[in-house]
Image (cartoon, helix red, strand yellow):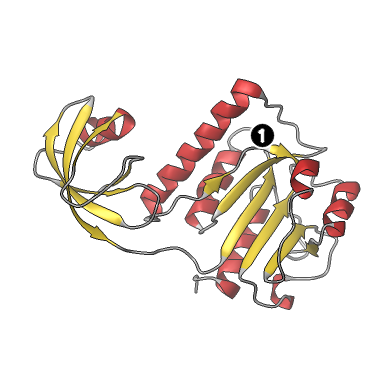
């Protein structure tokens, strides 16, 4: 059986004894039916991972003893920030999950002119926690040891007012009426990709982004859905400038 990878927000150190509760305990004891003596891998999103052995199991709590730390770095050399308008239904979950698997380091949910999703207050906080958990589950699956940052949601205007970068930072806004492709750009150290909602960004928003130093980007002759376009873009970027062959 493949050794399960479990995230915990607790400090980790070799030789320590920890108690896993909540969904982690239920997954190990009920779903996987693991028993004392079996091994798992623990990580806390700060880098590296630890081998761990189960020392006690119950439905609500699983005790583990930590072994050696493995300083394994699976992060891409390309730092990639995805700023994307919030989508309807499960599309945003899909984007967060797949962007995490593809190596994105930062995600900022945005509200633009054509964003149809209305979130604020407690509902927004609940959604942000949910997206963070989606990202954690994706890291458990894809074996990343560092969690991407899920930033607080904000309006596009608020975000653009702070979206300045240095000369090694490439800023791109998806715009299907542009004719410049990714391969035409010099290799950057980091990228910020701005993507609109269903229906895209308005002409005014695109112009505002360009005024803030964003270069228009097209992926080809076909118009992609809002959940497809960022993932296609990230895949190409990781192939050109990152760690995907």
Residue 92, placed above or below residue 74 = above
Asked which secondary structure carries label 1, the reply is loop
Q: Residue furthest left?
A: 37
- Which residue is pictured at 67% across the width and 27% down the height? 119
Residue 173, placed above or below residue 187 = above
Residue 9 appears anywhere in the view:
yes
Which residue matches tag 1? 88
Residue 123 horizontal side relative to residue 161, left or right: left
Residue 103 horizontal side relative to residue 191, left or right: left
Q: Residue furthest top?
A: 122
Residue 2 appears anywhere in the view:
no
- Which residue is pictured at 81% across the width and 62% down the height? 213
Residue 145: x and y in percent read: 38, 55
Residue 72: x and y in percent read: 33, 64
Q: Residues within 10 Å of mark 1 (few under 14, many from 20)?
A: some
Q: In which quarter of the image is residue 186?
A: bottom right
Residue 136 horizontal side relative to residue 185, left or right: left
Residue 61: x and y in percent read: 21, 28
Q: Quadrant of residue 111?
A: top right
Mark count:
1
- Which residue is pictured at 70% across the width and 41% down the height? 110
């Amino acid at each position: 059986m493949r050794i399960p990878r479990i995230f915990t927000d607790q400090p980790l150190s070799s030789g320590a004894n920890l108690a896993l509760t909540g969904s982690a305990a239920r997954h190990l004891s009920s779903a996987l039916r693991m028993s004392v003596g079996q091994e798992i891998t623990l990580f806390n999103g700060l880098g590296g991972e630890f081998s761990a052995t189960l020392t006690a199991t119950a439905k609500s709590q699983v005790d583990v003893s930590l072994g050696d730390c493995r300083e394994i770095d699976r992060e891409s050399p390309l730092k990639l920030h995805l700023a994307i308008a919030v989508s309807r239904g499960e599309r945003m979950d899909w984007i967060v999950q797949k962007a995490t698997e593809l190596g994105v380091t930062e995600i900022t949910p945005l509200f633009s002119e054509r964003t149809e999703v209305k979130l604020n207050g407690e509902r927004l906080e609940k959604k942000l926690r949910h997206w963070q958990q989606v990202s954690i589950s994706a890291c458990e699956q894809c074996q990343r040891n560092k969690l991407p940052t899920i930033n607080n949601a904000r309006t596009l205007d608020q975000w653009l007012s702070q979206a300045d970068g240095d000369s090694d930072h490439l800023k791109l806004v998806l715009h299907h009426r542009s004719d410049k492709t990714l391969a035409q750009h010099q290799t950057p150290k980091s990228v910020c990709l701005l993507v609109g909602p269903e229906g895209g960004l308005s002409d005014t928003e695109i112009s505002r982004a360009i005024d803030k130093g964003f270069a228009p980007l097209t992926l080809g002759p076909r118009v992609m859905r809002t959940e497809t376009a960022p993932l296609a873009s990230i895949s190409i970027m990781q192939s050109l400038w990152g760690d995907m062959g």
